[in-house]
Amino acid sequence: MSRPTVWRIAWSAIRPQTLPAALAPVIVGTSLAFAHGHQHLGVSLVAMTGAILIQIFANLYNDVADFRRGADTAARIGPARVTQKGWMTEKQVLKACVFVVLGALLTGVYLAWVGGWPIFVLGLVSLVFAYLYTGGPAPLAYTGLADLFVLIFFGEVAVCTTYYLIVGSVHPAAWILGLVVGLPTTAILVVNNLRDHKTDALVNKRTLVVRFGTTFGHIEYALCLLGAQLALALGLGFSLLPSGAWVGLIALPLAVWRVAQIRACTGAALNPLLGATARHGLLVSFLLSVGVML
């Protein structure tokens, strides 16, 4: 395989297919604030930028960390990783990490100016956990805790923080929508873990699928996609969400279809479903955003 251009290598390194997962909760939090009569374009744009930069940092550091630990080898069946392929050296990737972190810290300064110093601290905590995802002595991705991390930070924290920055308080609806957004994002990780469980086991990467088996992974995936729809339905049923949020339930048949699909796929055949699951989460977030604003 010939060496890609510099731009294609950079594009591959930041893993653009993962970035909608960082944008979705900020968009939903912004939409909910708008539905409650509040808006702040500057906060929304800077929060989106910060979320994307933190996601890119996590992706870049993961590229190096997984290569160092032997999780990414020539036997990998997922998308190409720039360190493993030799397209970038470890030093080059780590330098990129530093620049991305500096950018994220700058967005944090502005958001802290708007929402107070606890917001900056929360941003630092997000960066630390992005590092701990595959860094440190007990990486989250290697201990089975990554799923919980994704649910908390890509769901509850991102939606509620965005809403708080715009409104100045947190409404119960933000907590519910954090769950509705975070669960499909966690499902992306489940697909990844199902695809890589054999190679993960070889390097002692103890994901939940490695620990409990593929059947558990299929159940977890179903709970993520269908659980998001259930949380949305309950939020509507108890009148905790704007009535327009019912639009998000349109994705229920697609969620059922995805659950059926994953049971029939193994190995490299899961790669298309990885992208499809990411798009499903983005669709749910889009439908929610349109629904609550209208």
Image (cartoon, grey):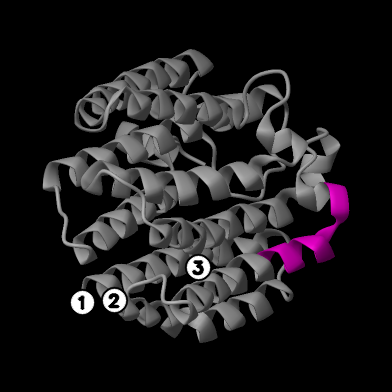
**Residue 50 lies in quadrant:** top left
The circle drawn on residue 291 is 2
Q: Residue at x 13, y 48 (%)?
A: 41
Element on which disc 2 rests: helix
* Quadrant position of residue 112: top left
Left or right relative to 233: residue 245: left
Query: In terms of secondary structure, where does tag 3 sit?
Result: helix
Nearest the camera: 106 or 203? 106
Kindly check if marks 2 and 1 are in contact, taking CB atoms under 8 A apart as contact: yes
**Amino acid at dot 2:** Gly
User: Marks 2/1: CA distance?
Assistant: 5 Å
Which three-letter amino acid code belongs to the residue tagged 1? Leu
**Disc nearer the start of the sequence (3/1):** 3
**Residue pointed to by mark 1:** 294
Q: What's the residue at 29%, 76% (across, down)? A: 291
Above/below status of 90 relative to 134? above
Q: Which residue is mark 3?
A: 276
Q: Secondary structure at mark 1?
A: loop
Magenta stretch containing residue 214, yes or no? yes
